[in-house]
């Protein structure tokens, strides 16, 4: 990965968290407008884009070789994400469940779940370069598409994290410290993937794990982002979901 790609990962969290910090210090009405109108649409677009990239680019890659047993690793990634969200409380989906006067243990639990997820999703960014050096048609993976999918996902996740911490009574300094840790973990995951020599089998398994995580996040976002509409879907949400899938299609082909 190039330096600008590491910076993009880091700054996407700074952007999302910074917007939330700014709004929380200014106007509650602006905060509500962002949470109820803009954030659900951004989440829906990012979820649809992740789903499109996973289905059209990543999954065909990991399933090209039957001997890799990729299906079990995709399911493992799905279940790992379920477990991590029991710690992070669904911040990856833009959930904000404030706990008034919460202690440090609450923030630590959130950061463990969110941090492990961020590190794991960064790993394949460092290993996809290795895929091109092996056969098995693995060179079809484009790290750029994966990078943009993660960036689009991180902006609303960072917004939700900052909003959750501020709404739970944590200070601005503490919130920025957590945001910086969160921002650094995906680049650290990518660096770890790039530095550690991974054989083709484990490279495929890591990518399959992340696909499982993406499938859980993307489908949950698309299902939940309309709030009280239950099983319905609003026209704006449908439009951004279709837009996300179309962008994934045209960039993957």
Image (cartoon, rainbow, N blue to C red):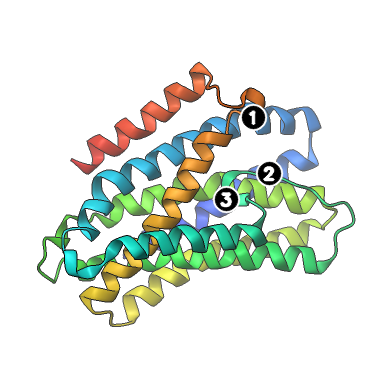
- Closest to the observer, 237 or 81: 81
Q: Residues within 10 Å of mark 3 (few under 14, many from 20)?
A: many
Furthest residue toward bottom = 197
Residue 124, compared with residue 244, is above or below; it is: below
Residue at the location (38% across, 48% down)?
148
Residue at the location (53% across, 30% down)?
41
Residue at the location (66% across, 65% down)?
111
Q: Residues within 10 Å of mark 1 (few under 14, many from 20)?
A: few
Numbered disc 1: secondary structure: helix
Q: Residues within 10 Å of mark 2 (few under 14, many from 20)?
A: many
Place of residue 65 in the rendered image (x, y in percent of width and height, measured from the top left) = 16, 64
Say whether residue 214 is left or right of residue 140: right
Of mark 2 and mark 3, the one earlier in the sequence is 2
**Residues under numbered marks 2 and 3 in contact, where contact means CB atoms less than 8 Å apart:** no
The residues tagged by marks 1 and 2 sit, at their Cα atoms, a distance apart of 20 Å
Identify the residue position indicated by label 3 in the image.
92
Tell me, yes or no, if residue 3 can be seen here: no
Q: Which mark is residue 227?
A: 1
Of mark 1 and mark 2, the one earlier in the sequence is 2
Numbered disc 3: secondary structure: helix
- Closest to the observer, 25 or 106: 106
Residue at the location (46% across, 44% down)?
218
């Amino acid at each position: 990965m190039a330096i600008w790609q590491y910076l993009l990962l880091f700054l996407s969290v700074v952007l999302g968290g910074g917007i939330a910090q700014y709004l929380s210090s200014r106007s509650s009405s602006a905060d509500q407008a962002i949470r109820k109108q803009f954030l659900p649409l951004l989440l829906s677009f990012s979820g649809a884009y992740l789903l499109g990239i996973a289905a059209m680019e990543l999954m065909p890659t990991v399933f090209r070789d039957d001997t890799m047993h990729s299906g079990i690793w995709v399911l493992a990634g799905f279940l790992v994400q379920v477990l991590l969200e029991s710690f992070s409380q669904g911040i990856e989906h833009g959930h904000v469940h404030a706990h008034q006067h919460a202690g440090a243990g609450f923030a630590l639990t959130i950061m463990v779940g969110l941090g492990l997820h961020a590190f794991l999703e960064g790993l394949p960014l460092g290993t996809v370069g290795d895929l091109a050096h092996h056969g098995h048609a693995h060179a079809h993976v484009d790290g750029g598409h994966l990078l943009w999918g993660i960036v689009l996902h991180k902006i609303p996740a960072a917004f939700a994290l900052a909003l959750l911490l501020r709404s739970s009574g944590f200070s601005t300094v503490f919130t920025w410290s957590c945001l910086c840790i969160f921002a650094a973990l995906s680049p650290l995951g990518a660096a770890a993937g790039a530095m550690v020599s991974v054989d083709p089998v484990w490279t495929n398994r890591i990518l399959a794990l992340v696909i499982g995580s993406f499938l859980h996040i993307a489908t949950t976002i698309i299902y939940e982002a309309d709030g009280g509409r239950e099983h319905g879907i609003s026209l704006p949400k449908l439009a951004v979901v279709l837009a996300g899938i179309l962008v994934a299609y045209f960039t993957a082909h």
